[in-house]
Amino acid sequence: MSRATGKRRPSEQTDPDLYVRVIARKEDGVVIRGAKAHQTGAINSHEHLVMPTVAMRPEDKDYALCCAIPADAPGITYLYGRQASDLRKLDPSEGGRIDCGNACFGGQECLVVFDDVFVPKERVFMDGEYDFTGLLVETFSAYHRQSYGGCKTGVGDIMIGAAACIAEYNGVDQVSHIKDKIVEMSQLNETMYACGIACSAHGRRTRCGVYAVDTLLANVCKLNVTRFPYEIARLLQDIAGGLLVTMPSAKDWSNPETREYVERYLAAADGVCVEDRMRMLRLIENLTLGSAAVGYLVESMHGAGSPQAQRIMIARLSDLDRKKRWAKDLASIEE
């Protein structure tokens, strides 16, 4: 969905192209039009899998579309997303590389516009079967939400490592409350991972032979991910200290006229290289405030559906009536 009004169905939008739809059907395929927003990694993908995002009704059948499209198909336009501190990566100097925090890796998001794109029929998996869209969305969402128990945990591992490093560089690695905070970061991170493992381990084999993850646990996994990374990032900023956002530029460190001041006044623990301390602080900035925070924090909140989407699924699947019966049985309450 791009700028569609959330209270209206796809066919009710003022602009009919706000959801991707089929505008023409031919013997050998279909022609589609519309846009997909928030597409992570779209620029470096070989293929796009276009899917419905909501359950649909008969009047929405032109939007009940699932298909695969090569990323370089004629008619596709990419609008690259803007990220925090992204201009730092355009600085070719060594100072610029230090201030990037992570100069070698990163992510990106795109608004992908499909302007009358032809899709051959062998690449069309759904066209008009609106009554299956709800099931398709729920099934895909469960897989997507399960995956967050792994991908955000991987970034969390880096956060924990950065916390341990900067504590050492700051000379406070043996302080009890610092050690406690790093343990808390680990506990939160491993809880996310445990949820991802649990919904996979409790998966079931479907009639066609494909295994499906446990939908309830997948949604619990993702709902935890909407909260825990923010707390991990908060603890990391707490441990890092205020220099995280007040540190001079790496160009001041590389400038012969000012380097002496940086070396002198940014020194911390004995034997720690000031440049290493600066690099670690910039990595933490990148992860919690800069361009990498897009993929860690904001994506943790809204990726695979915002928190309310998980709450709706948890409420639907948690079977409160059965749990009420258990409680009444223990309390000796007759129905």
Image (spheres, rainbow, N blue to C red):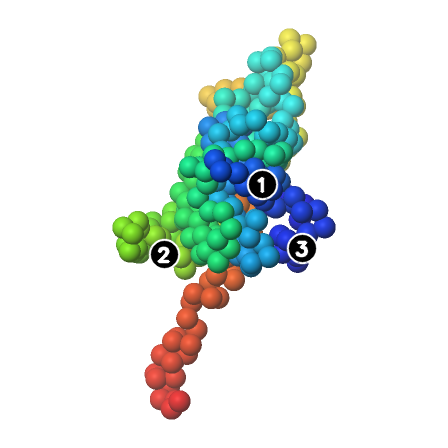
Image quadrant where residue 125 sits: top left
At horizontal 53% and vertical 27% (from top left) the residue drawn is 73
Which residue does the numbered mark 1 point to in the structure image?
Answer: 24
Which residue does the numbered mark 3 point to in the structure image?
Answer: 12
Which residue does the numbered mark 2 point to in the structure image?
Answer: 214
- Mark 1 and mark 3 lie on one chain; the one further toward the N terminus is 3
Q: Is residue 61 visible?
A: yes
In the picture, the quarter occupied by the C terminus is bottom left
Q: Is residue 272 above or below residue 221?
A: above
x, y percent for residue 235 = 52, 44
Helix, strand or loop for disc 1: strand
Front in this rendered view, residue 252 or 66: 66
- In whole angstroms, how far apart are the C-alphas of marks 3 and 2? 33 Å
At horizontal 51% and vertical 51% (from top left) the residue drawn is 128
The residue furthest top is 256
Name the amino acid type tagged 1. Answer: Ala
